Image: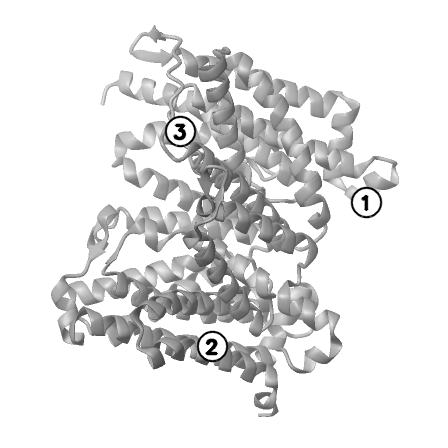
Amino acid sequence: MKQWLHPGFWITFVIVLALGLAPIVTQNASIREVMFTILLAISMAVSLNIILGYTGYVSFGHVVFFGLGGYLGMYLIDSWKASLPLAVLGGGAIAALLALALGASILRLRGAYFALATIGINEAARTFVANFEPFGGPTGIELHFSVYRDYGGPAQALWIAYYAVVGITLFAIVFSYLIKTSKFGLGLMSIREDEDAAEVMGIVTPRAKTLAFVFSAVLPGMLGVLFFFKNGNVEPGDAFRLHFSIETLVMIMLGGQGTLLGPVLGALGYQRLRGLLLTSDVKIGTLPLKDFQLVISGILLLIIVLFIPAGLVGWLRRRFAPLRRVLA
Amino acid sequence: MSPGTIASSIADGLLIGIVYGIAAMGLSLIWGVMSVINLTHGALISLGMFGVYLLFTTFGLNPYLALIVVAFFGLLLGVLIYLIAIARVIDAPHLSSLLATFSVNMIIIGLGTAIFTTTPRDTGFSLGSVQIGPVTLQGTRLVAMVVTLIVAGALYAFLYRTRTGKYIRAVANNRAAAELMGIPSTAILALSFGIGTMLAAIAGGLISTFFSFTILSGGIYELKSFIIVVLGGLGNPLGALVGGLILGVLEGVLPLTMPNTWVPVIEFLLFVFILLVRPSGLLGGK
C-alpha cells in the first residue's frame, strides 16, 4: 500500500482530474471537445505504455484495438440496440480477446520483427473490415439519429460520452500505476531490459507478455466505442489509421516511455501543439503556418529522439535526482 | 476464364512486381546492413515520383534521363538523412530509429503536401504498347522492367564484385568486427542508406511513368515493400526482387478468383503468417 503515498501518482492523477473537470465545471461544449481529444490521447498513450514502455515491445497495432472495439460497439448499438455501457464493455472484451489471440502468436517475435508484424495486422484488419458486410463494408456503420434519443438527445449524449472518457482515463492512470508498482510490472520491466535473463530468473515470459498485451488492449477497445458513438459513424479508414498508432508512440516518446506521468504530458503537449499549429494565422511566405504542422511536429520529434531519447520525464528524473522522489 | 486473360494477368503482375521489387530492395538493404526499419521509405518513393514528373513537365527532360538525375539526388539525400537523423540512434533501441525515420517521413510528407498539395499528378508519358498474342504490354512498363533489371544487376555487381561492396557486406555481417578490420563503418552505413534511398527514388520515378500519384502514394508502396522484404527474406536485397515478382503475380492473378478488395487482406495475412512461421523469409535469410 506504500506505493499509494508516492507523490508521482497523485501529481499525475490530479493533472488528469483537473483536465477532465475543466469542461464540467465551465459547462462549455467547445472546451469539452478539446478535452475529449486530449483525454482520448492520454488514455491511448497510457495504455500503449504498458506494452511499449514497461515491456519494451514496439507496437504499431494499438489502433487495431481501438478500431475493432469501436466497430463491435457500433455494431451492437446499431443492429442489436444495445445500450452504450454494454457496447463499451463489448468493445473492451473483443479487444482483449484479440490481444490474447495475437499475444499467443506474434509476441514470440522480438524487436523489429514484432513491430513489422503489428503493421501487417493493422493493415490486414483494415482491409478485412472494409470487406466485412455485417460491419457495413467500405462505408462502415452510421448510427441512426434516433439512437441518441435514449440518452436525452445528441447534446446530452456527447456529455455522457465525455464523462465516460474522463472515467476511463482516470482508471487508466490507476491501472497503469498498479502494474508499474506490482511484482508483475517488475517482471515486465525485466523483460524489457533482457528477456533471456528474465526467463532464467523464473519469469514465465510468454504469459507475462501476453497479459501485458491484453491489459494494454482493453482500454483502446472501450475508447473506440465512445469515440465512434460520439462521431455517429465509423469507417475502415478512420478506425484503423496506422498514423494514429504512430502518433500515440510519438506522445509516449515525448513524455518519457516507461514512466507514469510521461505519456500524460506527452499526449497533452502533442495535442496542444497540434491544435495551436492548426489554428494559427501566421504565414510562411505565401503559405499559412498550419500547412507546416506536420513538418514542425516532425522536426520536434527528430530533435527529441536524437537528443532527449528518455523523453521529458525521463530526462528530468535523470538530470535532477531529487525529482525522482516526486515524479513517477 | 480464357488462358489469354490468365496470361495477360500474369504478365501485368510480373511487370509491376519487378518494380515493387526494386522499391523493396532498398528497404531490405537498409534493414540488412543496419537493422533499421526505414519508415521514410514511402516518402522517398514519392519524392522519386515528383522528381521525374517535375523534370519531365517543366524541363521536358526525357523521364529516363530524369531518372538518372533523381537517382543521383536520391543517393545524396539518403546519405544526408543518415548523417543527420540516423547516425546518432544507430545503436539505440529499435523505437529510436523507427521514430527517427518516421520523423523524417513527417517532414518530407509535410513539406510535400504544403508545396504540391494532394491533387493527383500524371506525367502523361507514353511509349505505345506491344501486342504478343492475347497479351498487351505497355511500353513504359516494359522499359521499367529493363531498367529494374539493369539496376538490380548493377547492385549485385557492386555488392559482390567491388571492394566497397565487400565492406557493406562485412558491416552487415558484423559491424564491430568490420570496424576492427579498419572499415570506416559510418561512411559505409551512410552509403548503404544512400543506396537504399536511391533504389526507392528510382522505383518511384519508374512508377510515375505509368501511374498517377500524389505525395502520399509512396505509403502504399512502402506497405507493399514490407510484404515483399518478408517474402524475400529480411536483409536479402536480391531476394526482394523475387518477392516483388511473387507479390506482383499474386496481385495479377488473385482478382480473377475473388473480388479485388480481398486481395490486400490476403497479402497482409500472408505477410503476418510468414513472419510467424519463417521470420527469415520464404527464400531464407542472408
Characterize the local packing of mark 3: few (<14), some (14-19) or many (20 or more) Cα atoms within 10 angstroms.
many
> What residue is drawn where x is 44% and y is 38%?
B113
**Which chain's residue wears label 3?**
B
A269 or B1, which is in the foreground?
Answer: A269
**What secondary structure is marked by label 3?**
loop
**For residue A325, which quarter of the picture?**
bottom right
Q: Give amino acid for label 3.
A: Phe
Residue B59 visible:
yes
How many labels, in total? 3
Q: Give amino acid for label 2.
A: Val
Q: Tell me if residue A82 comes above or below residue B204 in the rendering.
A: below
* Residue B67 located left or right of residue B92: left
Residue A61 visible:
no
Q: Nearer the viewer, mark 2 or mark 3?
A: 2
Residue with the mark numbered 1: B176
> What residue is drawn where x is 64% and y is 56%?
A304
Residue with the mark numbered 2: A16
Q: Are marks 1 and 2 in contact (CB under 8 Å)?
A: no
**Image quadrant in which the C terminus of chain B is located:** top right
Residue with the mark numbered 3: B213
Q: Are marks 2 and 3 in contact (CB under 8 Å)?
A: no
Characterize the local packing of mark 2: few (<14), some (14-19) or many (20 or more) Cα atoms within 10 angstroms.
many
Marks 3 and 1, the one that precedes in the sequence:
1
Q: Nearer the viewer, mark 3 or mark 1?
A: 3
Characterize the local packing of mark 1: few (<14), some (14-19) or many (20 or more) Cα atoms within 10 angstroms.
few
Q: CA distance from mark 2 to mark 3?
A: 43 Å
**What secondary structure is marked by label 2?**
helix
Residue A28 rendering spot, x and y as whole percentages: 31, 73
Residue B86 rendering spot, x and y as whole percentages: 67, 44
